[in-house]
Amino acid sequence: MSGLLQEMTEKALALNIPLSVQLDLTYRCNERCVHCYLDHDDHGEMTTEEIKHLLDEMASAGVFILTLSGGEIFVRKDFFEILEYARQRTFCVKLKTNAILIREAEAARIRDLGVESIQISIYSHRPEVHDAITLVRGSLERSLDAIRFLKSQGLRVVIANVLMIQNVQDYTGVRALAEELGVESTLDPTITPMMDGNRSVLSLSVDQSALQQVFRDTGLVGNVDEFCAVAAPADENALSSLPCSASHTTCYVSPYGDVFPCVQFPLPTGNVRKQRFLDIWRHSDQMNEVRSIRIKDLTTCTQCSHVSNCSRCPGLAFMEGNMRGPSTQDCEKSFARTGVPSANMLSKRRAAANLVQIRALPALASASA
Amino acid sequence: MSRLFVARNPRVAARCLDGEMMIMSGRDSTLFTLNRTATILWQAADGTTPLDEIVQSKICPAFDVEPAEALHDAENVARELASHEILQISEEPIPPATALAGESR
């Protein structure tokens, strides 16, 4: 984050302003990614007029960065009408898309509307791997064509790659592809549970050895020794800090108008069809509960050696059952990074040892003697 | 002396945070913040009101400053913002961009 953006974020935090919002326009999608956490059926998306009204409310509330995502945003027939309206309200608009519906004309329109960046999901440089994840034949080729169209318009494109069992060998290939295309790339090893709580997709997560390999790749992490070092013990400042920006300067709105602290934090806090966006942001009990949590309030994690530099996601912790608890996926990342098990992992090991303790039965022992 | 007209560049993103305008350049995503004077100028930059009128009606009353001095400063600010493509300046009125003629809050 740039110094000035950091300064603005701190100002927004002090003023209780939702500086950045992700708005999912639809959960419908033209791909069927094997790791996706969404239900793609339409259960009553907001209409064009409802979304425009919400954008007015969000602009008045001080929202500056607006990420339009889904589902696939381009399956909405009114997408450009919404985008144009958002830009008229001078939001800094970022798009997340698979881009397979973006051709030359769409790329030119996106440029004309002054979009800040377009994040595009690419899972492999090999069609047989990428298309096997999206379950759409030819999807890699179409997404790459779209990237070229967008680049030719001078737009900022970011390739987003999610690491999973299927593509674990390909992230260096994706990075090379990004360099060849002249675009940025990110890599995320986190698989998110389904929004309904179903955790079966987590079986696609990569194992410890793959995480270790990723965390020791200088091209990704820079200085490996620094990145993989165990953190210094948390001081009072670290313990008083916020777990993340969710509910503090950011939140998420679903296509049905439900407001959550974050896209990865499915705690309902209100619905913009029934309440004003700003009222939900300021007065929702749930939003304020999340807002009240400091690192020192976290159960288990305060005892952990990783507490001051863990990537712990409060939303993933919530999906595990306790928003003040650990997020096991992040414990695994800290372990892969440093080789030091987290307090949560040690606690689980102790519990497991108690459950499977095996002792010779006295009768059998004497019989065999 | 010719009059100067100023218009917000429709390609930038902007939001007012506690009286100060936060602006992201459409050219290279650089973030800028404007002080309160520049923020007033930005908000009034509709392409049709001449800069001297903006200074007279919006800036002088807010800051208790001499009109000639305020106009000189405002012209410098406008040219500086134009160099970053945040503002458009012209000696003729600037018609609103057709696609993005929105107001900034």
Image (cartoon, rainbow, N blue to C red):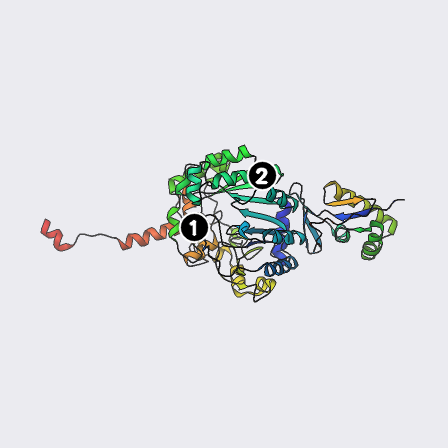
- C-alpha separation, residue under disc 1 versus residue under disc 2: 48 Å
Point 46% across, 47% down: residue: A31
Residue A149 circle label: 2
The amino acid beneath tag 1 is Cys
Residue B86 circle label: none
Point 32% across, 54% down: residue: A351
Q: Is B91 left or right of B31, judged from the image as shown?
A: right
> Based on the displayed image, in which of its 4 quarters is residue A197 positioned?
bottom left
Tags 1 and 2 both on a single chain: yes
The percent coordinates of residue B53 (x first, y second) are: 84, 53
Q: Residues within 10 Å of mark 2 (few under 14, many from 20)?
A: some
Secondary structure beneath dot 2 equals helix
Secondary structure beneath dot 1 equals loop
Q: Residues within 10 Å of mark 1 (few under 14, many from 20)?
A: many
Q: Closer to the camera, B91 or B32? A: B91
Chain letter of mark 2 equals A
Q: Is residue A329 among what the camera can see?
A: yes
Q: Is A128 left or right of A100, judged from the image as shown?
A: left
The percent coordinates of residue A298 (x first, y second) are: 46, 56
Q: How many marks?
A: 2
Q: Closer to the camera, A260 or A292? A: A260
Residue A304 circle label: 1
Q: Is residue A1 among what the camera can see?
A: no
Residue most extreme to the bottom: A274
Q: Is mark 1 in CB contact (under 8 Å) with mark 2? A: no
Which sits earlier in the primary sequence, circle 1 or circle 2?
A: 2
The percent coordinates of residue B65 (x first, y second) are: 85, 53
Q: Closer to the camera, A173 or A33? A: A33
Point 13% across, 51% down: residue: A365
